[in-house]
Amino acid sequence: MSNDKSAVRRILDHVKAAGRTTLTAPEARGLCEAYGIAIPREGVVTNATDAATLAAKIGFPVVMKIVSPQILHKTEAGGVLVSVKWAEEAAFGIVGIRVGVLKDVMFRLAPASQEDAFSMLASIVNPAGLIARPLRPLPVLHRAGTQSTAGGSS
């Protein structure tokens, strides 16, 4: 079994410097890799197009999970989608997780002007379908049927 203590130290120092006592899924993955522990293929995406592309690359079905130091119990928060079977489903899944977990929705009284509509879109997703605020929690994809060891509860 490999043992990359410097990688482990970097990850733990980063978490400590951030004032956290828990790891995100990517940080836990880094620890597992440093110790030679086998884990499923995964990746972090920030938009619908990349979610669809990565899901296809990993191989269907996949599981989508939110990544956030503030959301440890992903299932309870509505941040897990299982058995995603198509690229289109993965693309819509990233938006669904965002709305379900973050309650990132926008309302205006009717009639809304065109300026209101553009303002509402910009605050949720931009017209190209990219998440407007990439520093918010992001989903992790990994192959369905495997158990993730990363990031606390799944």
Image (cartoon, rainbow, N blue to C red):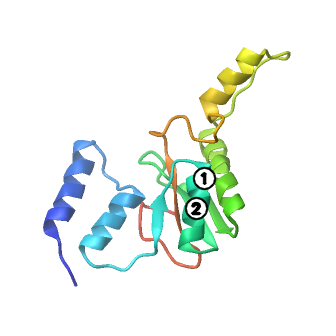
Q: Position of residue 92 (x, y in %)?
A: 69, 52
The amino acid sitting under disc 1 is Thr
Residue plotted at (65% across, 47% down): 95
Q: Is residue 128 above or below residue 67?
A: above
Q: Which residue is mark 1?
A: 49
Residue 129 occupies which quadrant of the picture?
A: top right
Around disc 1, counting alpha carbons within 10 Å, would you say few (fewer than 14), some (14 to 19), or many (20 or more)? some
Discs 1, 2 touching: Cβ within 8 Å = yes
Residue plotted at (58% across, 41% down): 130
- The span from disc 1 to disc 2 (Cα, nearest Å) is 6 Å
Q: Residue furthest bottom?
A: 1
Residue 116 occupies which quadrant of the picture?
A: top right
Secondary structure under the numbered disc 2 in the rendered image: helix
Around disc 2, counting alpha carbons within 10 Å, would you say few (fewer than 14), some (14 to 19), or many (20 or more)? some
Q: Position of residue 99 (x, y in %)?
A: 66, 42
The amino acid sitting under disc 2 is Thr
Identify the disc placed on residue 126.
none
Residue 6 occupies which quadrant of the picture?
A: bottom left
